Image (spheres, rainbow, N blue to C red):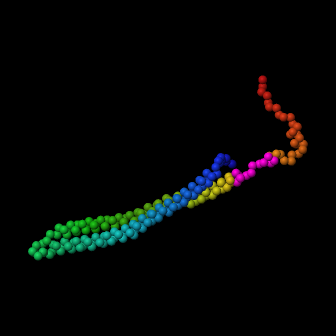
Amino acid sequence: MSEAKVENIDAIRAFRTALLKFMDAANTSIADSESEAVATLRWLEVDQRTYWSNAVRKSQELVSRCEEAVRHKRIFKDSAGRTPSAVDEEKALAKAKRMLEHAEERLENVRRYTPKLQREILLYKGQVQRLNTFVNGEIPAAVAKLDKITTTLQAYVNLAAPTDQAAAPMNLPADASEATSQAPPEQPPQEPP
């Protein structure tokens, strides 16, 4: 049997408490991080897709209105019979086209990165599963072992020390006690001269 030197049972109890706190903190962190990942995926799939789809539609409508305004300026003449300048309308059209390109690019990014994020979340869950298994399997087993150790040590500490009567020989035969009392004391060996 192995030998251990235990000086303080309370230190084992404190370690047990710290282990349980770690288990709670780890479980909370794992749950929070998984929740954050799922919320981010939902934000990307639902909120961002909806937002940029609407932005594309609104930008297309704005481009159409600006093109119509430019066409209108080029076709119709003013009261003096001149063709009015369409510079402002062309600037507005260019700006609307840039907005449309930006919205289309963002919508494409949402479509492209949604499956990538789903894959990364699955990989993350696979990696965290090992930690989760350890935290929820090994730590409770270790806590149970620590409980058993502290119970055993406490029972050992609570054992009563033997009293003087218990240390005295009990019911020795009369001749055995006399033999031990009459035997000459042993002489220590003498050193050679």
Residue 139: horizontal and vertical position, in percent? 58, 57
Count of numbered circles in the view: 0
Picture layout, residue 152 above or below residue 57: above
Q: Is residue 127 left or right of residue 177?
A: left
Name the quarter where the C terminus is drawn. top right
Identify the magenta region: 155-166
Residue 134 appears in view: no
The x, y position of residue 97, in whole percent, is 25, 67
Instruction: Please report the residue visible at 33 percent of the width from the left and 71 percent of the height from the top.
Output: 54
Can you give x and y, in whole percent of width and height, for residue 57 in the image? 30, 72
**Residue 99 appears in the picture as rendered:** yes
Examine the structure image and report whether residue 3 is included in the region drawn in magenta: no
Q: Quadrant of residue 178?
A: top right
| Residue at the extreme front of the image, as rendered | 164
Residue 18 image point, x, y percent: 57, 55
Query: Quick check: is 160 in the magenta stretch?
Result: yes
